[in-house]
């Protein structure tokens, strides 16, 4: 199953809105076939493994990271392919939460006499497909907040100098993470200060769709994220009509939301993104957007690159969260750390307090 999970990673950035899936066929203690879902519309992992195994698939055991599908989509049902291949035993990591599958694949297999087990390395499989799992269960994208900061939590000096706090190795890792996301979100301040491209130029892979939060329309249609990267403008309905028309005349997609003095509710943003089939979003804005994302409780996971620098007075990584008592603090669970050269990569899931008023 660990091999199947590693194989599944080959589809990162290429299969959304489908899940990452890896499959390994074993017969008489030997791997006879393996595969992964590599692109939307392409063969599923089970089909690749069965094709690789050929006649040796009969009487084998299939290790697969997600329940085999039972419905006709872009490809035939994998459960039927498993039965037709004569596989006698299926060991699966996790059940597919998609309502079109959700246990039906298991039922189809068992009805055909195939032994089915589920739950092997389930936590790892859930984590690997966190975006798919959340989107299928809630209709919302999985949101990751990314920060690059000094040891004392600063993202820029008091003069605004910020290039580069983290190492080139950390920046390459961050670009790889971008390539695995459907969308990347920044604020107007970042666009105005840096005019970023928000692409994956440091690695090979697909570029995420840029979304720019600009409730007061401080940016311009000529910014790189709009003119070169076809970014989506997220703004308030109270924005001046003539300014909105500038963006629309430039054929820039505009999402307008209810707002209070230019401040939009990011819950509404992720809800619409989920409706559009976006499963994963990476928030890379500055301290203001980071704080807004946490206050609006849209963040599922934080990824923090910590550089071995102490800056002192400067721009903090996260703005005011309105925390007066420790009981109101946002807690981090499932903490994982690793070294990236001299930098430290800190990853964790977000746990909010019980209520905004607590």
Image (spheres, rainbow, N blue to C red):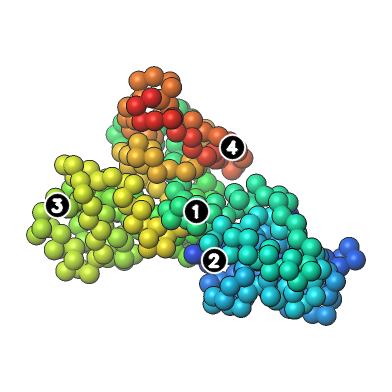
Q: Is residue 240 left or right of residue 345?
A: left
Q: Residue 244 placed where, x, y %? A: 15, 59
Residues packed near mark 2 inside 10 Å, few (<14), some (14 to 19) or many (20 plus): some
- For the residues labelled 4 and 1, the Cα–Cα distance comes to 21 Å
SS at badge 2: loop
Residues packed near mark 1 inside 10 Å, few (<14), some (14 to 19) or many (20 plus): few
Q: Nearer the viewer, mark 4 or mark 2?
A: 2
Q: Which residue is mark 2?
A: 100
Q: Are marks 3 and 2 in contact (CB under 8 Å)?
A: no
Placement of the N terminus among the 4 image quadrants: bottom right
Q: Which residue is mark 3?
A: 239
Q: Residue 254 placed where, x, y %? A: 24, 61
Q: Are marks 1 and 2 in contact (CB under 8 Å)?
A: no
Residue nearest the viewer, comparing 136 with 222: 136
Q: Earlier in the sequence, mark 3 or mark 2?
A: 2
- For the residues labelled 4 and 3, the Cα–Cα distance comes to 41 Å
Q: Which mark is residue 334?
A: 4
Q: Which residue is mark 1?
A: 137
Residue 122 is at least partly visible in this image: yes
Above or below 216: residue 292:
above
SS at badge 1: helix
- For the residues labelled 1 and 2, the Cα–Cα distance comes to 12 Å
Q: Nearer the viewer, mark 3 or mark 2?
A: 2
Who's the residue at 59% across and 37% down the image? Answer: 334
SS at badge 3: loop
Q: Is residue 124 left or right of residue 227?
A: right
Residues packed near mark 3 inside 10 Å, few (<14), some (14 to 19) or many (20 plus): some
Q: Earlier in the sequence, mark 4 or mark 2?
A: 2
Q: Earlier in the sequence, mark 1 or mark 2?
A: 2
Who's the residue at 46% across and 47% down the image? Answer: 144
SS at badge 4: strand
């Amino acid at each position: 199953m660990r091999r199947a999970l590693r194989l599944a990673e080959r589809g990162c950035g290429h299969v959304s809105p489908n899940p990452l899936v890896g499959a390994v066929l074993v017969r008489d203690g030997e791997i006879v076939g393996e595969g992964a879902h590599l692109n939307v519309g392409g063969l599923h992992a089970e089909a690749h493994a069965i094709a690789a195994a050929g006649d040796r698939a009969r009487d084998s055991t299939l290790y697969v990271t997600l329940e085999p599908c039972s419905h006709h989509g872009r490809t035939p049902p994998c459960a039927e392919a498993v039965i037709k291949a004569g596989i006698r035993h299926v060991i699966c990591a996790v059940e597919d939460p998609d309502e079109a599958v959700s246990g039906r694949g298991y039922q189809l297999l068992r009805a055909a006499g195939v032994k089915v087990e589920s739950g092997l390395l389930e936590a790892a499989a859930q984590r690997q497909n966190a975006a798919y799992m959340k989107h299928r269960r809630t209709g919302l994208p999985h949101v990751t907040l990314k920060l690059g900061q000094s040891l004392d939590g600063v993202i820029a000096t008091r003069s605004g100098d910020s290039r580069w706090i983290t190492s080139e190795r950390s920046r390459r890792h961050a670009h790889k993470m971008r390539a695995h996301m459907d969308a990347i979100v920044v604020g107007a301040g970042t666009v105005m200060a840096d005019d970023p491209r928000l692409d994956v130029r440091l690695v090979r892979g697909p570029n995420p769709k840029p979304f720019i939060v600009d409730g007061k329309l401080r940016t311009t249609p000529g910014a790189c994220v709009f003119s070169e990267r076809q970014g989506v403008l997220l703004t308030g309905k109270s924005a001046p009509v003539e300014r909105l028309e500038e963006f629309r005349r430039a054929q820039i997609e505009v999402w307008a939301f209810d707002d209070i003095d230019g401040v939009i509710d990011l819950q509404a943003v992720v809800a619409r993104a989920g409706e559009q089939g976006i499963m994963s979003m990476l928030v890379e804005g500055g301290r203001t957007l980071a704080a807004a994302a946490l206050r609006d409780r849209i963040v599922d996971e934080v990824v923090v690159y910590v550089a071995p620098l102490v800056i002192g007075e400067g721009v903090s990584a996260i703005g005011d969260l309105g925390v007066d008592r420790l009981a109101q603090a946002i807690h981090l669970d499932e903490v994982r750390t690793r070294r990236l050269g001299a930098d430290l990569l800190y990853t964790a899931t977000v746990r909010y307090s019980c209520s905004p008023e607590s």
